[in-house]
Amino acid sequence: MEIKTFKAKTMRDALELVRRELGPAAAVLHTREVNGGPIGRLVFGRRYEVAASATVNVPSRLPVEVVREAAPVLDYSLGGEVETFFESDRFGVADDAKGIDDYRARYRDDFRRQVAGQLDELHAMVEKLCDHAASAPAHDLPEAVFRAFTDLIEAEVDESIAREWIEEIRRDGEGRILADPALVKVRVVEMLENEIKVAGPIVTEAGKCRVVALVGPTGVGKTTTIAKLAANYRLREKRRVGLITVDTYRVAAVEQLRTYADIIDLPMEVVATPREMRDAVARMSHLDLVLMDTAGRSPRDEVKIQELKSMLGEAEPDEVHLVLSSAAGAKNLVSTAEKFADVGTTAIVLTKLDEAHSLGHLVSLVRNCPLPVSYLTDGQNVPDDIQVAARGEMAERLLGISG
Ligand SMILES: Nc1nc2c(ncn2[C@@H]2O[C@H](COP(=O)(O)OP(=O)(O)O)[C@@H](O)[C@H]2O)c(=O)[nH]1
Ligand SMILES: [Mg+2]
């Protein structure tokens, strides 16, 4: 028995090949679609394979002549086609009626098996699509969670952070929480709160001089913050406070601090060299708190950053607060924090919270910078517009929920 296989893009073409090569009396023994799966079909297109023999004694299933315009294209997914094909007069009619009946039965079973297989494939494909949709964020999100996501984006929280939080809430949240916008919001605030590190206020100790330096780029509010801190510690906490400024680059900067020193009635030293710095700190060592103002430094100016580092090296401050304006962009804030790390920063002061359109971009800083936040300032008023950073309040503020 000689069996040959023929492949073509359509079943009709494959059968035509059989007819041409083996003649119209050839027996078709087996047919199948080669790239059966949905992916195979997608990548390689459909292909059909027909196994046929000219020597096997079964009734021919080949049409005597393939009439192109009349013959329907065989497509198993359309089911009834095979019946049409089978029922049609285009089949060669065998002599033996029983043989035809047997053959019909076998052929129908074969066909049903193939259709059942294709249905399974289809079912698997639909299931896969459903799974995929379930794992994609923001598709099947409950309304309350989706709203929280859009609120985060509107508050200018980095999209990848927002997705991460929302995904976690969707995955772990109880149904009761997922259905309630207020509870979802509380959960988001909690998640941010968990990421925020705070330093607490500067703590002074009787008999010990606490030296605190403020550093940062120009114009971020270092001098104003020093004035706010000095006024609060001097006037409200009744501490003995002194000021040192190293900002001798600008006469106006020295004058600005001197004005505050005069109003609050504080001793003030102006230093220009590391040696002067050491002497000034020694002269103020009897005070409770020495606040040190420094010249603004561009984070890109390595030389100036190193200069600042050696100046601070002489002062040996207990704390170095990096002052950052919340009006700056997220990337800028993160890279500035990295550049200033070299001078020994221990905390961050976030200023100008009142000026920024939204504060969600600060979440990236909070997450990427290992330093805790010490103070938040939100206005030009000395001494009122400053608060000690507290996690809960800060989280709400960054998300635009209050404040
Ligand atoms: N709106 C607003 N302005 C501030 C804040 N802090 C400082 N400023 C203003 O920012 C400007 C620069 O402040 P300054 O202390 O001189 O910055 P420095 O160069 O870092 O010392 C001044 O006009 C301040 O009044 C704040 O929290 N909010
Ligand atoms: Mg200044």
Image: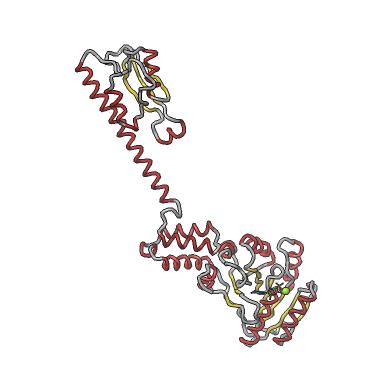
Q: Left or right: 124 with respect to 357?
A: left
Q: Left or right: 141 with respect to 242?
A: left
The coloring applied to the image is secondary structure
> Percent from the top left, x then y, of residue 165?
48, 60
- Compared to residue 304, the image places residue 129 above or below, namely above
Report which quarter residue 262 is drawn in.
bottom right
Residue at the left extreme, as displayed = 98
> Percent from the top left, x then y, of residue 282?
74, 80
Quarter of the image with the N terminus is: top left
Answer with the quadrant where ligand 1 appears in the image.
bottom right
Mark yes or no: residue 138 visible: yes
Residue positioned 45% across, 68% down in the render: 186
Report which quarter residue 261 is drawn in.
bottom right
- Taking depth in this image into account, of 212 and 114 the one nearest to the observer is 114
Mark yes or no: residue 275 visible: no
- Taking depth in this image into account, of 13 and 196 the one nearest to the observer is 13
Report which quarter residue 177 is drawn in.
bottom left
Residue positioned 53% across, 57% down in the render: 159
Quarter of the image with the C terminus is: bottom right
- Compared to residue 133, the image places residue 332 above or below, namely below
- Compared to residue 12, the image places residue 220 above or below, namely below
Residue positioned 34% across, 17% down in the render: 52
Give the tally of numbered discs.
0
> Percent from the top left, x then y, of residue 89?
28, 19
- Taking depth in this image into account, of 361 and 308 the one nearest to the observer is 361
> Percent from the top left, x then y, of residue 266?
72, 85
